[in-house]
Amino acid sequence: MFKRILIANRGEIAVRIIRCCREMKIETVVVYSQADEKSLPVVLATKAVCIGPARASESYLNQDVLLEMAKRMECDAIHPGYGFLSENADFARACEENNIVFIGPSAEIISKMGDKQSARKLMMENDVPVVPGSKDLIKSVDEALEVAGQIGYPVLIKASAGGGGKGIRKVFSEDELAGAFETARAEAKASFGNDDMYIEKLIINPHHIEIQIMADHEGNTVYLGERDCSVQKNNQKLLEEAPSPKLSEELRIRMGETAVAAAKAAGYDSAGTVEFVADDDGNFYFIEMNTRIQVEHPVTEEITGMDLIREQIRIAEGRKLSVTQDEVDCRGHAIECRINALTPGEITFVHFPAGYGVRVESHIFEGYEVSPFYDSMIAKIIVKGDTRLHALRRLRRALEELVIDGITTNAEFMHLLTYHPDFIKGKYNTSFWENSHEEIEQWLKEGL
Amino acid sequence: MELQDLMKIWDRFDRSGVELVELDIDDMHFRLKKSVPQASAAVSVQQSAATASEAAQAAPENPVAELSVKGVRSPLAGTFYRSASPEEDPFVSVGSQVHKGDVIGIVEAMKLFNEVQSTEDGVVREILAEDGGLVEYNQVLIVLD
């Protein structure tokens, strides 16, 4: 059993992990940057150590200092949260070499799944449907033209080492291909130092559906239902719900079992998410696997009744999964709404919603200074209802109650989003924000 | 004004990061002054008599000195050593004359030894960091006059 865990993260996820550790009687060490000196994780942790200036590269991304602190403070394990070093294979390896448990899968698996083209290949070898695309890396423009012709336009040129939207180009016709390929390749080289490219069929306005999986060291693997994350602004998720309003029960089971197969193929352990895109015809395709706990994990927790952080820690300690697939029971409907700060500044007043079926995950408090250095998400409002409509009404009620003064946030926008007919009907895909945000912004100005 | 009220004010003052408080109560004038600048992680220091009771929060376990203290701060988090090796003499002691650029100690992280250079000229008044102890980023290692 772990005695002490170092949390290599900040904000709401650090708070989440600390709370879980406290309940498990595990001590916590929080390492923080100067910008986070007056923050909730620093207050709640057993011990907090300032490790650097605001710049992430000198603090939260500084692997040497993190390892030094973990060793110095005699921590058994490091929880990397999400973002930062959570999917950094080098860091996971360095933890292993220093006899510190990295709470997540092994360095080898992170590395395997982080290389998107090889992850695709692995899935193809295991009969997991992938977005039709190139079998291997594309080395030249001529090869690109040939493969794209075979796949059929439109296509998506992607960097194998990619992420964050870099090294990606949409190509709608053959004459655009050569230019797009060269540009994407150059961008990939500049952003990741790696210009390995591959090509996929471009699925227009898909549904983004991801399956939460959990596996222990013995290879026991379960899926914990799906999350629909199609409400996205510029590839950034705004709202997630479980289950997806789009999936039939049959499709849900098929995707879940496919995700488990994918995880087993990778030799996965710990928490992970298998991402798919789905079209309107019931076809789904593997895109990638995220080898970390995700921001939106609470919606899965709400419908399964499972504490996923606790499960992650238990698995890292070497314990078995606490449930078998038969014991996994998804009930009701949960929605998570992300509240983002649109400006930095001091929070002069905050009142969070509460009451039956409402859960808030946040690190803010009155007097807290939202700094411009990090992610702008300041709170997650999560609701659970017996049905989707019930959850929707609860979310509206919660957002109506929410007050955050001192800075501007997207709370009002999100509240009005819940009144959009497409959202209410559950008939939306990744084009939803693009198609509806102007209308919602109009409502913001004039009223509904 | 009861004696126990004065004790309460004194006690609060002691725990605060405030250095000097002057109070006029019941035709009496009180002046409380600290002889050594206190280490504190105060949010803000309010030095008006009326708000003496709202003075900065209690001193924390981690000694992060106020910005007004003249001294040398750690450029990274790690283990502090006063000398280059256990056999050698410490770089500085109380009373040592220090010039800007002089090495005053070492902070080690992951087997890398970083020499900490003084950012100012002065005489070492106090060595706050413990030899072999954990230091935080920006923590005051030595205080200079």
Image (spheres, rainbow, N blue to C red):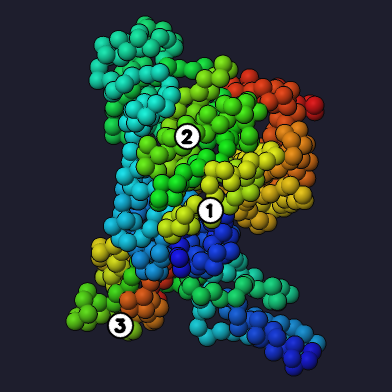
Which sits earlier in the primary sequence, circle 1 or circle 2? 2
Disc 3 and disc 2 on one polypeptide chain: no
Disc 1 and disc 2 on one polypeptide chain: yes
Q: Residues within 10 Å of mark 1 (few under 14, many from 20)?
A: few
Please name whichever residue, A258 or A1, is drawn nearer the observer in this view of the structure: A258
In the rendered view, would you say A76 is above or below A56? Answer: below
In the picture, measured across the screen, residue A211 lies left or right of residue B50, that is left
Q: Residues within 10 Å of mark 2 (few under 14, many from 20)?
A: many
Q: Which residue is mark 3?
A: B93
Q: Nearer the viewer, mark 3 or mark 1?
A: 1
Q: Which residue is mark 2?
A: A259
Q: Quadrant of the N terminus of chain A?
A: bottom left
Q: Quadrant of the C terminus of chain A?
A: top right
Percent position (x, y) of residue B137? 41, 63
- Which chain letter goes with mark 1? A
Percent position (x, y) of residue A61? 39, 50
Check the image and name the residue furthest to the left. B87
Residue at screen point 65% across, 81% down: B12
Q: CA distance from mark 3 to mark 1?
A: 57 Å
Q: Which residue is mark 1?
A: A322
In which image quadrant can residue B107 be found?
bottom left
Q: CA distance from mark 1 to mark 2?
A: 19 Å
In the picture, measured across the screen, residue A236 lies left or right of residue A146, that is right
